Amino acid sequence: MPKILVTGGNGYIGSHTVVELLNNGYEVVVVDNLCNSKPYVKDRIADLADRPFGFYQIDICNLNDLKDVFHKESDISGIIHFAAHLFVEESVENPIKYYQNNIVGLLNLIEATKLLPKVDVVFSSSCTVYGNPDEVPISESESIKPAMSPYGNTKKMAEEILRDHSMANANFRTTALRYFNPIGAHHSGKLGEDPLGHHTHLVPIIAEVASGKREKLMVFGNDYPTRDGTCVRDYIHVCDLANAHVKALEYMLGNDQISGFDAINIGSGNGQTVLEVVQAFERATGQRINYELAPRRPGDVDRIYANITKATRLLGWKPELDIDDMMVSTYNWEKNK
Ligand code: UDP
């Protein structure tokens, strides 16, 4: 089976994807500098998949270290590139940290691939590239708006860099997966979102309130032009998202006809308000959530959710897990981690 390099494979989405790759028979090599993940994760991945994989604790911003990995693993056929800083607020406060890491890391990765005869890349992109969309559901052909944060801008720039490089080099093809809001945890309860700092995303925060670690949820804004005044997002289970990466690799590795760059939305195709997510959590887990209405959070778009017909058409992918699975698995993870 092909060997796949996964950058950031110890992180939240990366770890679920590595399990999915190993379960599908791929050989996997992870590079990760553990800047936002914990060392236990790689052991859990190996336990869950019951198969070993390569692991290099390096920083992709160090080109020599990265090239050493490519020299040792010269039979890499595919790359899934997750490694990036991902906190919107931090990126506003310290933009250069984000450009330095996310853009230099990507340029180094492209440079290192020159050691390979041919490679297919799946890039971890985001619906943040759409900015505040005029129409929803949003499809890939919609125009890309100015990014709302330096973090969002690094995703937009990275897509442009990958597009230009893929167009200029027949031996380098890219599929960018534009994720909507990944949540949930592995059904085993052994993997889930576990950042080094505190949680900033809605659903893990709700789970912390339910488990008593946090007093209440602050609902940011109830005066948006939506059903109940709170923001609408498209929540997708991390295991469905992991599976989309495997499907994207299969699509490229098995198809000589495709070339260049393409971008594909990965979401559920449905929009949910913040208050609907709170209700879904309460319904699925039986736990009441204490919340308080608070001012808008700067940078939030009113509403965004995906048109996912392209993912189904090209990759044969569609989400299998529903909002209840997302809530229950997040809560189990929160209680057991
Ligand atoms: N949100 C909230 N309270 C929180 C965290 C998030 O009301 O403590 C809202 C946020 O304003 C947005 C939605 O929940 O409307 C999803 O936010 P999240 O940070 O999970 O993802 P984002 O869409 O910003 O990537």
Image (spheres, rainbow, N blue to C red):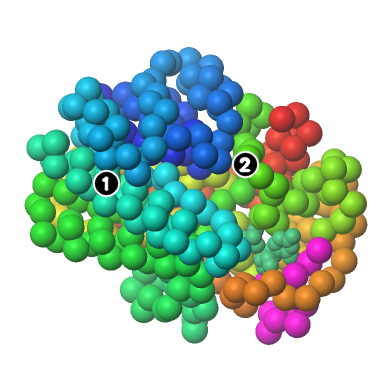
Residue 226 in magenta stretch: yes
**Residue 135 shows in the view:** yes
For the N terminus, the quadrant is: top left
Q: Residue at x 61, y 49 (%)?
A: 183
On screen, 79 above or below 299? above
Q: Amino acid at mark 1?
A: Asn
Q: For mark 1, what is the residue?
A: 108
* Residue at disc 1, CB closer than 8 Å to ligand 1: no
Q: Quadrant of residue 73?
A: top left
On screen, 244 above or below 136? above
Q: How many discs mark residues in the rendered view?
A: 2
Question: Would residue 261 be found to the left or right of residue 219 on screen?
Answer: left
Q: Are marks 2 and 1 in contact (CB under 8 Å)?
A: no
Mark 2 and mark 1: Cα distance apart in space: 25 Å
Query: Element at badge 1?
Result: helix
Q: Residue at x 80, y 45 (%)?
A: 208
The stretch in magenta equals 218-231
Prevailing secondary structure class for the magenta stretch in the rendered image: loop
Q: For mark 2, what is the residue?
A: 195
Q: Which numbered tag is attached to residue 59?
A: none
Q: Position of residue 90 (x, y in %)?
A: 58, 60
Q: Amino acid at mark 2?
A: Pro
Question: Would residue 302 be found to the left or right of residue 154 on screen?
Answer: right
Q: Quadrant of ligand 1?
A: bottom right
Callout in the foreground (2, 1): 1
Q: Position of residue 25 (x, y in %)?
A: 34, 24
Query: Element at badge 2?
Result: loop
Q: Position of residue 243 (x, y in %)?
A: 44, 41
